[in-house]
Amino acid sequence: MARIGSLSRKTRETEVKVTWNLDGTGRAAVMTGVPFFDHMLDQIARHGLTDLDVRAVGDVEIDAHHTVEDTGIVMGQALRLALGDARGICRYGSAFVPFDETLAFCAIDVSGRPFLVFDAAFPSPKVGDFDSELVEEFFRAVAFNAGITLHLKVHYGKNTHHMIEALFKAFGRALDAATQLDPRVTGVPSTKGTLV
């Protein structure tokens, strides 16, 4: 059975459509109107070996905040939809990703209990026109709408672009590990019998 989540959300500030195939090949088709953010979403797909289609139109003439956050909301909801009842998944995943002088880490628990720990101090407030603080906003939106526990940390780094990109790559890889189907897992991977 295909593990695909597809949905859309429209507000007065944004219109976002997402299709997320967890069993893909790393293909991304992303257009949000925020070029650096598009590049980061591409990293999730390529390094997580998922297929990700994202179309977002937002009030970027004000700034990218609404577009980035709302994309995270819809991506989180699509992820939850794709996972279904999460039967047979590994549940936990983690990844260290080096990028030149930077080392980033991500750990995920597909727990049904949304939580975010974000530990990254970016030396620059912007990468091009992209506000660095939006990285945390994006991952918070994903975690709370997907119902996952998410820990992200940059252990060290000097280049803000490298630090952010390493986090997105680590997230993709950790998500791939957590959502893999393991034939040894029967039912939901929890002693409670449910992931909530």
Image (cartoon, helix red, strand yellow):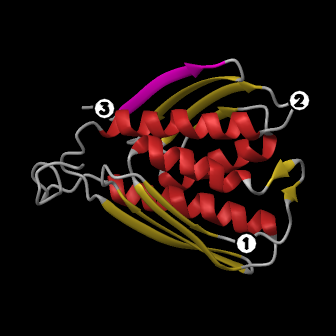
Q: Quadrant of the N terminus?
A: top left
| Nearest to the observer: residue 26 or residue 79 | 79
The tally of labels here is: 3
Q: Residue at x 68, y 54 (%)?
A: 135
> Is 67 positioned to the left or the right of 176 in the image?
right
Mark 3 vs mark 1, foreground winner is: 1
Determine whether 144 is above or below 157 in the image: above
Tag 2 and tag 3, C-beta contact below 8 Å:
no
Residue 196: give x, y in percent of width and height. Answer: 24, 49
- Is there any visible trace of residue 24 in the rendered image? no
Name the residue carrying label 2: 61
Tag 3 and tag 1, C-beta contact below 8 Å:
no
Any magenta on residue 153?
no
Name the residue carrying label 3: 2
Task: First in sequence, mark 1 or 2: give its number.
Answer: 2
Residue 150: give x, y in percent of width and height. Answer: 46, 60
> Is 188 positioned to the left or the right of 138 in the image?
left
Amino acid type of the residue tagged 1 in the rendering: Ala
Residue 23 image-quadrant placement: top left
Which secondary structure is most common in the magenta stretch? strand
Chain part drawn in magenta = 4-11
Amino acid type of the residue tagged 3 in the rendering: Ala
In the structure shown, which secondary structural element does the residue marked by tag 1 occupy? Answer: loop
Instruction: Mark 2: give few (<14), some (14-19) or many (20+) Cα within 10 Å.
Output: few
Determine whether 158 is above or below 10 in the image: below
- In whole angstroms, how far apart are the C-alphas of marks 2 and 3? 38 Å
Tag 1 and tag 2, C-beta contact below 8 Å:
no
| Nearest to the observer: residue 81 or residue 112 | 112
